[in-house]
Image (tube, rainbow, N blue to C red):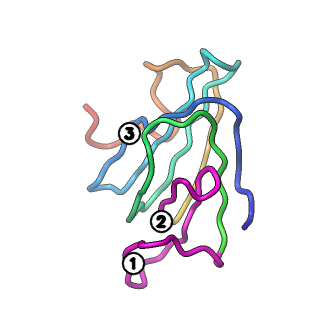
Amino acid sequence: MELVAGWDRPFRVWHYSVSYRQLLMRSLADVAPKRVDVLFSNVRFFHGPTDFDRLEIHTGADFTPPGAPEIGGAPGRWFVLNAESCYLYGTHCQWHEDDGNAMTPSRFGPLKRTD
């Protein structure tokens, strides 16, 4: 499996839009000098908790999660978070670090349907 990115700091699911299939995870700047936003796009499946002590993202064609649903040829790939304890199926993973706080809009937003 290929390492995409990793941070040794807490993250949480910040926003999930079912209709737009976007999953935003955020680590606030209160534990590190920068805020980090991680956006997964076209998410068709997510299995995992909403809070993480750290975040390590891997991907690879050789991973098939146990008991995962049939995706049916949808574009994308499996992303594994924290050594297979959490995984999701999506097309893109992007991240951005900035000096924002919890109230500052994400670089990836405004995310639709959050008003």
Q: Which of marks 3 and 2 is nearer the N terminus?
A: 3
How packed is label 2: few (under 14 Cα within 10 Å), some, or many (20 or more)? many
Give above or below for 45 relative to 50.
below
Amino acid type indicated by mark 3 = His
Q: Which mark is residue 15?
A: 3
At label 2, which amino acid type do we have?
Tyr
The answer to the question of whether label 1 and label 2 lie on touching residues, with beta carbons closer than 8 A, is yes
- Most frequent secondary structure within the magenta stretch: loop
Quadrant assignment for the N terminus:
bottom right
Residue at x 38% of width, y 83% of height: 72
- How far separated are the C-alphas under marks 3 and 2? 16 Å
Per the rendering, the mark at residue 9 is: none
Q: Crowding near pointer 3: few (<14 within 10 Å), some, many (20+)?
A: some
Q: Mark 1 points at which residue?
A: 71
Q: Is 89 inside the magenta-drawn segment?
A: yes
Residue drawn where x is 59% and y is 53% of the image: 81
- Extreme residue in the bottom direction: 73
Q: Residues within 10 Å of mark 1 (few under 14, many from 20)?
A: few
Q: In the image, which residues are magenta?
A: 61-90
Give the residue type at disc 1: Ile
